[in-house]
Every structure is written in structure tokens, then in C-alpha cells.
Amino acid sequence: MTVSVSERVSVGLPPGMAVGIAAGLGAGAFWGSTFIAPLLVPQYSNTDLTVGRYLASALFALGFLLFTGLRGRFRLPTARQALDALGLSVLGYTGYYLLLVWAIESAGAALPALIIGTIPLWLMLLGKPQHLRWAALVPGLLLTAGGLALMMTQSHPGDGSGGVQRWVGLGWAVLAMASWTAFGLLNARWLRRHPEVDSTLWANWLGVAAGVGSLALWVVAGSDVRELAARPDFGLFVLVCAVTGIGAAWVASVLWNVASRRLSTSLAGQLIVSETVFALVYAFAWDGHWPAPLQLLACVLFVVGILASIRAHR
């Protein structure tokens, strides 16, 4: 009898857990693609790409809501739900990214990236189910921490400004890390408390809210629209924003909501490291070269850490 890959993966796992793990890994695959976007249009800033991505995601979400409305299933959020969506979109989308931009401007890219990389560890520690013993989480935590440590050896934390500016950047990076960690915890709790709102509908509401927030981000740090539109490769920029807006923002949000609803926050948090693995795979494929031995070992530790965490939560 032939056994499919999906059946082999889900052996020994409750169906809901298997679906949640697949959704979490899928979200990581889409999130990882955002690291390739700047390589496609290197002359555009990360802020412009982010604003464009969230606007594209918001337009797609609005279109999806209107389509469901034509089929008689249109549903607007209550005032409280709208405020929740706006607040969480700031924590996990636009506000988080603005803090990250400020961190990079003050301290360079490497140091903030290392601090943001600890988010899975914080979610694992803060989101542990009460019935799960701490000892069960130790293997996954150590493997993930080991992978991060190896990644640090490949970075250059000394890049960027020195002195006071570097400490300011460190502070912004810590706030960005805390912002997304809070989003991960609060978003999962919101979904568990509102089973009447399905994952796709919540992704649509978050997408629209993030679109509103992206306009504020554009006012603070974005480029002039006329200047952007005058560039010869503006069409490619719009295409990249549309693809990442639909894939890395909207689809990934739906998948992450599915994972957050079906898995404990600690296990879902562990799956975030898949974003780093996929990002490295995409980057290596784009550059056409093999990873350095330590980078490859770090990816192996990340994957084994995910497997160890799945086993602990099973």
C-alpha cells in the first residue's frame, strides 16, 4: 500500500495538530519570500516595499470581503473587533516594522536582525501550555538557541553607527521584538476567544487595518509617490508589492491564524524559525551558491528543533 508524504508526516499527530503545523510551515515559507523582494527591486527602500505590500494586501482583503458580500456572506466587524484588528495590526505589522526600520537606521542591519531572531524563543517561553513540563521544551529551546548562535557568527554586529546611536538602535530593536512577541501572544488568544470569526475573515480584517496603518507609515517614512511612479521600473515594484502583499501578507496571515488557532503558542512560535530557513534557501537559490557550513548547520539545528518541539507538544 502506498503512503503519501502528508500521511507520513501526520503519523502519530492529531489531525488538527498536523493541519496547524502544515499551516505554520506554510506561513514561514511565504514570510521567507519577503527577504527576496528587496533583491528584485534593490533601488527601492524597505519602507516603500512594506507600505506597498500592506496596501496590496488591504486591497486584496477588501476585494475578498466584497466578493463574499455578493454571495450574501458579507460581515463587518463590530466596533470592538475593528479596534482589536487595528491594535493588533500595529503590533504585528506596521508599528513593528517602523520600530525595526528605526533600529536599522541607528544600529545597522545585523544587530536588530539578531534580536528579532529571538522571537521564537520568547513565544516558546511565554506561550507554554500549563500541562507541558519545562523539561520537555528544553531540547527545542537549546537547538533553536544553538542555531541562532551559529547565525550570529555569520553576522557582523559592529556594523552601523557607534556610541549613543548604537544603543538607541538596540532599544528600538528590543521594542520591535517585544511588539511582535506581544502580537503573537495576543493574536492567538483573540482567535481562541472568538471561534465565531474564521481565520480568513480575521486575516481580511487585519489586512484592511494594516493597510490603514501602512498609510501612516508612508507619511512618516515613505517616499514621494510621484518620484516612485517616475522610475522606469515602477511596474516591477508594483508587481513585487502585489505578489508579496497577497502571498507574504494575506495568505501567510490566513495560514498563521490557522496555526495559532490549532496549536499552542509555544509550538506555533517554534515554527517561526522556518521563516529563517526558507529565507536562506531562497537567498541561496537566488545567489546560486551553497550556504557556508555554519549556516547549513544552523538550518539543520532549526529543523531538528522544530521536530523536537513537535514531539514535546504531541
Image: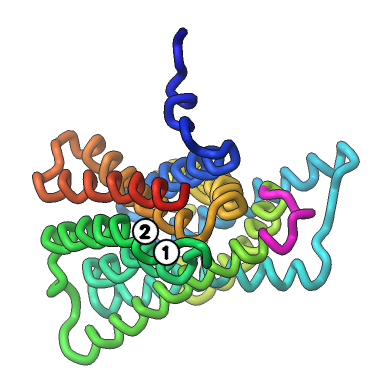
Residue 197 part of the magenta-drawn span: yes
Residue occupied by mark 1: 133
* 282 left or right of 200 in image: left
Identity of the amino acid at label 1? Arg
Residue 122 figure quarter: bottom left
Q: How crowded is mark 1: few (under 14 residues within 10 Å), some or many (20 or more)?
A: few
* 57 left or right of 2 in image: right
Residue span colored magenta: 192-199
Numbered disc total: 2
Measured as percent of width and height from the top left, residue 67 is found at 79, 40
Residue drawn at 19 percent across, 50 percent down: 298
Q: Can residue 143 be seen in this view?
A: yes
Task: Using the numbered discs, state the Cα–Cα distance from disc 1 to disc 2 in whole angstroms.
Answer: 5 Å
Q: Do the residues labelled 1 and 2 touch (CB within 8 Å)?
A: yes
Q: Which of 169 and 179 is in front in this view?
A: 179
Residue drawn at 44 percent across, 58 percent down: 269
Furthest residue to the left? 293
Residue 50 part of the magenta-drawn span: no
* 260 left or right of 36 in image: right
Measured as percent of width and height from the top left, residue 272 is found at 41, 54
Furthest residue to the bottom? 164
Q: In this view, does 247 lie above or below 96?
A: above
Residue occupied by mark 2: 136
Identity of the amino acid at label 2? Ala
* 133 left or right of 290 in image: right
Residue drawn at 43 percent across, 76 percent down: 178
Measured as percent of width and height from the top left, residue 131 is found at 52, 63
Q: Nearer the viewer, residue 113 or 213?
A: 113
Mainly helix, strand or loop, the magenta region? loop
Q: In this view, does 284 lie above or below 62?
A: above
